[in-house]
Image (tube, grey):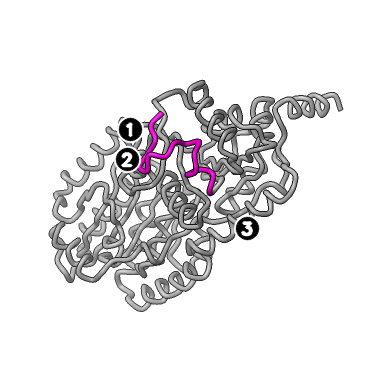
Amino acid sequence: MTIGNDGTDMTEANLRRGHTVQLCLSTSWGGLEQTVVEWSKRLGERERCGVCICRNGSPLHARLDADGLPFVSLPPGNRYFDPRAVHAIRSACDRSSIDFLMVHSSKDLWLAACAVDPRRTRILFFNHMINRTVRKTDPAHRLIHGKIEHVITLSRPAREGFLSTTSMPPGRVSIIPDAVDPERFRATEEESKEVRRRHHIPPDAFLVLTVGRIDPKKGQRELIDAVIDLSRRGLDLHLLIVGSRTRNEHEKYDSELRRLVDEARLGGRIVFAGERENVAPYYRAADLFVLPSYCETFGLVLLEAMLTGVPIVATDAGAVPEILDSGRCGRIVEPESPAAIGEAIRALHDDPALRRRLSEAASEKVHREYTAGRVTDTVLELMDRLGGGKAAAKPFGETVKSWFVSRRG
């Protein structure tokens, strides 16, 4: 076990002052992991602690360390059965008066459920996925879900999917969206100009941007196909692809995307910018943002685009229609369709007034509903309410007993 940044042992005052710890043992890097980093900052600023238990050597570990945020890193281990991780989590919660363990991945729920006593530490599960098909009502999942005090889903589709596939009572599942911080997510005009200079994009060129890890489900192939087709039909535009594939994943897909660009001889116009620590200048440099995902639980990048005022084209996936207000804040197209994406890009390219109307509506909505301060207040109010009464979750023994009673009935 490695203690991060401030050198404070996990059982000492650094945890006692806030009584909240996050758990995220993911070794990937994407919107979920970025959200964990943001919650570490928000909890720390509100004096609710924010220490994150993560895997040693993971991208999340590296980002927490680089940002000077408190963490405890555990050695690599199995996500479902790791006695060392269970012991570390249990020790922290039992000896440090931890009120809430915030879990961000369903895979980590197994370890969390084994580690905590729900009569003393309550599990708050942030469900970052939409599941409408895989039922999780078997005895093992009932045991795990019985240890959760409350579930936070990011959208209506996510809540509906969770309730339809689990045995969790509706009263213990809330909708609280993700958020962006206007104070942190900003860029100067000079920074946006530098983005164009760095990637050899003329100042007056129409620039399309997409941000996300390289993954077939993120739809970069369809977007590239759309841009290639538009270019062949004479539309003058550039595409910046910000993001990289997760280590040891989708190498073939990444190579295929680059081959498509090379074969179309558009290497100067379709640019792979890789992972960028500060993406705000990229949004400000763009004329249009496109989210071509097949599925999207929420889409934090949509909030980032809305905040920076770049108009949006996004696929009808997951929470996208909810965020974009059924098209009032951005053009919504069918997923997996290069033709639909291309048609929307051309329409917004040719209509500056439409781009302006969409971006103004999006900016108004993100400041009204999706700011970090507002969302943080909502989550902390929920935690205060849960902390004021008897825990709803049950120890394993009581959960097993209730399940057998229900089966007999």
Which residue corresponds to mark 3? 381
The span shown in magenta is 1-17
Callout 1, which amino acid? Gly
Mark 2–mark 3 Cα distance, whole angstroms, equals 31 Å
Callout 3, which amino acid? Glu
**In contact (CB < 8 Å): disc 2 and disc 3:** no
Is 388 included in the stretch rendered in magenta? no
| Residue 57 - label | 1
Mark 1–mark 2 Cα distance, whole angstroms, equals 7 Å
Which residue corresponds to mark 2? 62
Residue at the (48%, 22%) spot, across then down: 84
> Viewer-proximal residue, 59 or 243?
59
Q: Earlier in the sequence, mark 2 or mark 3?
A: 2
Secondary element under disc 1, as helix, strand or loop, is loop
Residue at the (17%, 63%) spot, across then down: 194
Left or right: where 301 falls relative to 393? left
Question: Is residue 129 at all visible to an observer of this figure?
Answer: no
Majority secondary structure in the magenta region: loop
Question: Is residue 20 at all visible to an observer of this figure?
Answer: yes
Q: Is residue 227 above or below residue 75?
A: below
Residue at the (75%, 44%) spot, across then down: 390
Is 13 included in the stretch rendered in magenta? yes
